[in-house]
Image: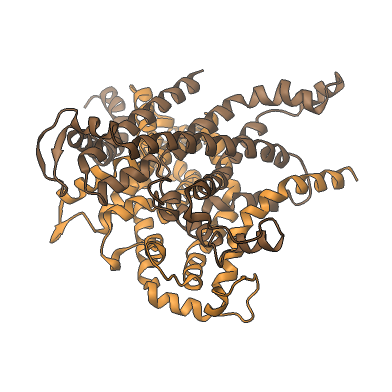
Chain colours: A brown, B orange
Amino acid sequence: MAPRARAAALPWLLIAPSLILACGVIGYPFFEIIRLSLSDVSRFGQIRGFAGWDNFARIASDDIFIAALLRTLTWTVCVVGGTILVSLPVALVLREDFWGRGVARTILMLPWSIALSMAAIVWLWAFNADYGMINATLVSWGIVDKPLQWMARPETAFPVEVGIGIIVSIPFTVTILLGGLSSIGGEIYEAARIDGATGWQSFWAMTLPLLAPFLNIAIVLNVIHVFNSFPIIWVMTQGGPNNQTHILVTYLYELSFYLGRPGPAAAVSLVMLAIVFSATAIYMRLREA
Amino acid sequence: MKKLRRSIIAWAILSPLLAVTLLPFAVMISTALKPHVEVIAAPPRWLPTRLAWENFVDMWTVLDFGQSAFNSVFIAIAATLLALLIAVPAAYALSRLPMKGRGAYQQFLLVTQMLSPVLLVLGLARMASSIPFGDGTLTDTRLGVIVVYAAYHLAFAVWMLASYFATIPADLEEAAWIDGATRAQAVLHVFLPLAVPAIAVTGIVTFVASWNEFTVALTLLRDPSRLTLPLKIVNLVAGRYSVEWNQVMAATLLATLPVAVVFALLQRYLVTGLTLGAVK
C-alpha cells in the first residue's frame, strides 16, 4: 500500500475493534428489540408473526405503563433537581479553603464506589419498620410516636427511593461542578470585590453564568442516568406495592422476564430509547453551543 | 482566625449531607457485628453488646462467598482488560492521528454511551441465547457477561483515555522519530510509559463499574455457582420472609469496603480525569 493510503487507513484500523464490538453487542440487541416490538411474540420468545403496531397499542392502553411513564417523569425531575440543588452549594463550599476539606471531600465521594444494589439493600434495612435505625432514631427523638411502615406504602416508599437516588447521584455531580469552578480564575472575584460586589452578587452575576455549561452537562448526564436507573427501585420494592412504585425500567424488566410479555416489553424499550435519544440530541446541541 | 471561622461554617453546611452519607456505612458495620438476637430486638441500638464475628463465617458459607467473589473479580478483570485492549488503540487514534470521520466516530461513541444496557436487556438476553458456546449458549456464562460489560464501558474508556492522551505532548514521540524510531517503536517506548497512569485510572473506573454492575448479570446469569456478589447478596433479601440481616450486612460490608477504600485513595486522580473529559 502507498504510504499515504496507509496513513489514512491506520486510524480506522485502530478504531475498528471498538466499532465491531459496539455494533455487535449494542447494535444487534437494538435490532432484535425493533423486530420483537413489531411481532406477535409468545411468552417463551417465539416469534409467531408480524403484529404491526399491536404491541404499542397494547402498552398505550396499559394503565400500569401510563402510570409508570408519569412516575418516571416525577422520578427523573425530582432526583436530578434534588441532586443539583444539593450539589451546587456543596461544590461551592468544597471550593473554599478550610480545615479538613480533603476529609470532607473523600467522605462525600464514598457513595460513588458503592454498587447501587448494595446501597439499596443497606437503606432497605435502615428503613425496616421494626428493627431499622431510621425508625429507631425518629422515635427516640420524638419526631414520630410509633414506627412507620416505610416500604409497605407507595406514598412513603417512592419518596424514600427518590431520596436515595439523590444521595447516590451527588458525588458525580459535585465532581463535574468542582471541575467547572476550578476553571473560573480567582482574579475576577478579586476585581468584583474591589468594585464593591457582595458575595451574593458575584454568585448570581459571575459564578452561575460561568458555571452554566457544567450545570448543563451535569443535568443532561444525570437525566439520562437517572432515567435508566434500575437497581434502587428493583431491590427496594420491585415496583410494588401494587405496581405503585414502578418506573419504566422496572416495569420493562418485569414485562420481559416475569410477566412473559416480550412483545409489549420491546415496545416499552423503544419508547424509552426514543426519550433517551431526544435527551442525547439536546446534549449534543449543548456541547456544540 | 478567618480560616477557623470559614472551617466551622463549611463543616456546619456539609454536616447534614455527611451524616446521610455515612449513615449506610454505620448501619452496615453496626448490624454486621451484632449477634442475631440483637438484630431482631426492638428498639434496635447502634452498639452490639459483643462483636459477633461469627456473622462473617456464617455468611461465607451461606453465600458461597469465595466462589461469588471469584466470579465478580474474574468478570470485572476480564471485562476491564478487554475494554482497555480495544479502547487504548482507538483513543490513541482519536487523540493523535489525522482522521477522516473523527466527528462521526465521536458521535457514535456518545450514542453508545447513552444506550444503557437495561434498555436493551431483552435483546441482550436473546442475543446471548442465540450464540452457541461450549455445550450450550452464551446465556449463563461468564464470557457473555464479560463481553457485554466491555462493550458498554468502551465509550467511557475511549473518551477518558483520549482526553488524557491529548495532554501528553506529541513532541516526545516526534523526537524519537527523528532519532530513527518507527512509529510503533515510539508508541511502545515513549508514549505508553507516559500513558500508564491514564490507563490505570481508566482501568480502575471500569473495574469498579463492572464489579458493581447488577442488571446485566441479573439477566444473563442463572446458575448459583456463577452469580456475582451483588446478585448473591440481593438473592438473600429479595422475596424472603425471614432475612438474616446480620449476615447480609456482613456480606455487603465485605463486598463494598475494599472497593470503597481503593476509590477513596484514587478519587483525586479520577476527578482530574473526569474534569478533562467534561471540558473537552
Res A68 → quadrant = top left
Name above or below for residue B113 compared with residue B50.
above
Query: Is A142 placed left or right of B215 in the picture?
Result: right
The residue at the point 27 percent across, 54 percent down is B220
Taking the view exactly as shown, the residue that stands out farthest to the right is B1
- In the rendering, at what x and y percent does residue A46 appear? 11, 45
Residue A128 visible in the displayed image: yes
Name above or below for residue B174 compared with residue A254.
above
Taking the view exactly as shown, the residue that stands out farthest to the left is A48
Query: Is A125 placed left or right of A203 in the picture?
Result: left
The residue at the point 40 percent across, 36 percent down is B91
Q: Nearer the viewer, residue A57 or A279?
A: A57
Q: How many marks?
A: 0
Res B35 → quadrant = bottom right
Residue B181 visible in the displayed image: no
- In the rendering, at what x and y percent does residue B109 appear? 37, 32
- In the rendering, at what x and y percent does residue A191 appear? 81, 21
- In the rendering, at what x and y percent does residue B23 appear? 62, 58
The residue at the point 38 percent across, 47 percent down is A243
Q: Nearer the viewer, residue A211 or B154?
A: A211
Query: Is A102 placed left or right of A213 in the picture?
Result: right
